[in-house]
Amino acid sequence: MAHSLRRRTLGLLSGLSVVVAVAACGEGAGAATEDDAPSSSQADASSDAGTGASDDAAASGDLADGTYEAEGSYSTPGGQESIAVELTIADGVVTDVTVTPEATGGNAARFQDEFASGIADEVVGQELAGLSVDKVSGSSLTGDGFNAALDQIRADAAA
């Protein structure tokens, strides 16, 4: 049990290192991202996803296999947006993910579409416990909505 927890912790730290490295590389690249416009949610760290009572159950591997659906909301410079997330887990590992963009137009719709097209590469094969995303396919704020949906899915899977 302690070995499994240590392995998960090392895996999470390793994943965090990759996210930090990727974020650092992308900052000076000049590519347009949702971060180009200030937002009140930017003070919210997307790595906060996964905090709460359900994490104890998730960390101990007590997640029920199945397909779960949740909606995640997040703030953008244009207002509040949301995305729908469907996630399948088996033995605590994400085996499938579908993100359905719900933005009605503008930059939010473009970023949600880009996020939806790239998210599977980031999360399939990863353990649900502690999973959190940052920037995916140039979309950074959409990750806040995805992480909010992950929190709900973790809670549902731990119930």
Image: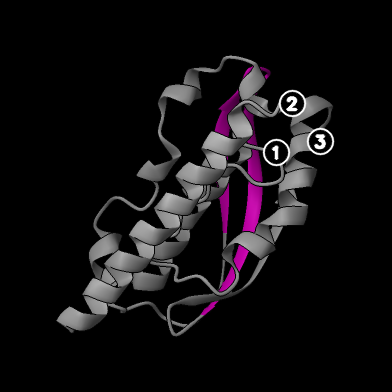
Tell me the quarter of the picture where residue 97 sits: bottom right
Give the residue displayed 48% in from the left and 56% down from the top.
Answer: 150
Earlier residue among tags 2 and 1: 2
- Check if mark 3's residue and mark 2's residue have beta carbons within 8 Å: no
Give the residue displayed 41% in from the left and 52% down from the top.
Answer: 16
Q: Which residue is mark 3?
A: 110
- Check if mark 2's residue and mark 1's residue have beta carbons within 8 Å: yes
Tell me the SS state at disc 3: helix
Asked whether the viewer can see residue 134, the reply is no
Given the image, on which type of amino acid does mark 1 rest? Gly
List x then y, in percent, for residue 142.
62, 39
Look at the image and give the residue range highlighted in magenta.
Answer: 70-89
Tell me the SS state at disc 2: loop
Q: Label 2: few (<14), some or many (≥20) within 10 Å? A: few
Give the residue displayed 73% in from the left and 41% down from the top.
Answer: 112
List x then y, in percent, for residue 143.
57, 43
Given the image, on which type of amino acid does mark 2 rest? Ala
- Check if mark 3's residue and mark 1's residue have beta carbons within 8 Å: no
Q: Which residue is mark 2?
A: 32
**In the orientation shown, which residue stands out farthest toward the left?**
2
Earlier residue among tags 3 and 1: 3
Give the residue displayed 47% in from the left and 62% down from the top.
Answer: 153
